[in-house]
Image (cartoon, rainbow, N blue to C red):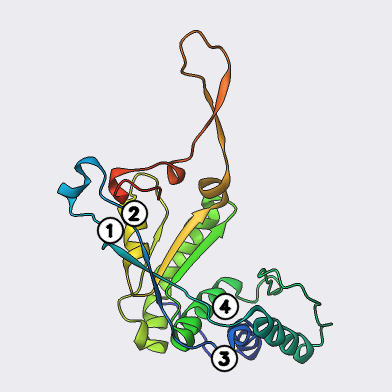
Amino acid sequence: MKIQFESNLDYQGQAIEAVAGLFAGQQINRSEFTVTAGVRGNMSTLGMAETDLGVGNRLSLLPEEVHSNLNAIQLANGLAPSPLPLVGDYTIEMETGTGKTYVYLRTAFELHRRYGFTKFVIVVPSIAIKEGVMKSLDMTREHFGTLYPEAKGYDFYAYDSAKLNQVRDFATSSSLRFMVATIQALYSVQEAAEETEGSSGRRKAERVIDRPNEQTGGEKP
């Protein structure tokens, strides 16, 4: 059985346009950043030096310009304009059953087409939802590939602390990339038994994403 996805539902298009319109006036302008700050110890044998660069979603618009776009979108949707200061945190609300996952995935493709954005981190509250998002990305690959041929070569993966090479690919690839992670994997701090001899206390275990690692050139993922 093959699932067919509708690409012309008005209410979904309105939600996608609301997000894309927030960056109206943005030019395609990718910026580079250093992935590995320097050669550390035997890292040079891995071929990881200061020239290992990543590609970022550089925003060239001024905060006031983004806010002006926001107010225009709000007025067009019958919402009261938000006052300054701009905080850079926006929400698109949709009712249950309207295809929110499809909409935010397609929104990413639209942002890539219009503005050249390539990095998208999808943060979800549970492992079950993470698996569902990964399934959606897999099922829509052919559909989005047809709608957005310029995104050919895009990839997606779930953040896995045992596969940090994927984090490096996410950072350095100039193609569209999705990384799906749970809130806990990125932000939670777990309690671990204190390893210091003679201590019966507990300590906060540093997350893998915050620890230097050979798979990421000696840098924190």
Q: Is residue 186 left or right of residue 158?
A: right
What's the residue at 44%, 62% (across, down)? 179
Residue position marked by numbered label 3 in the rendering: 25
Residue position marked by numbered label 4 in the rendering: 103
Quadrant location of residue 32? bottom left
Three-letter residue code for mark 4: Val
Asked whether 209 or 30 is in front, the reply is: 30
Which label's residue is closer to the chain start, 1 or 4?
Answer: 1
Specify the quadrant that holds the N terminus.
Answer: bottom left
Query: SS at mark 1?
Result: loop
**Percent of width and height locating residue 208:** 43, 41
Q: CA distance from mark 2 to mark 4?
A: 37 Å
Q: Nearer the viewer, mark 2 or mark 4?
A: 2
Q: CA distance from mark 3 to mark 1?
A: 33 Å
Q: Which numbered tag is attached to residue 37?
A: 2
> How many residues crowd around disc 3 within 10 Å: few (fewer than 14), some, or many (20 or more)?
some
Three-letter residue code for mark 3: Gly
Query: SS at mark 4?
Result: helix
Query: SS at mark 2?
Result: loop
Residue position marked by numbered label 1 in the rendering: 50
> How many residues crowd around disc 2 within 10 Å: few (fewer than 14), some, or many (20 or more)?
some
Q: CB atoms at circles 2 and 4 under 8 Å apart? A: no
Pick out the residue farthest to the top: 198
Q: Nearer the viewer, mark 3 or mark 2?
A: 2
Three-letter residue code for mark 2: Ala
Q: CA distance from mark 4 to mark 3?
A: 22 Å
Which label's residue is closer to the chain start, 3 or 1?
Answer: 3
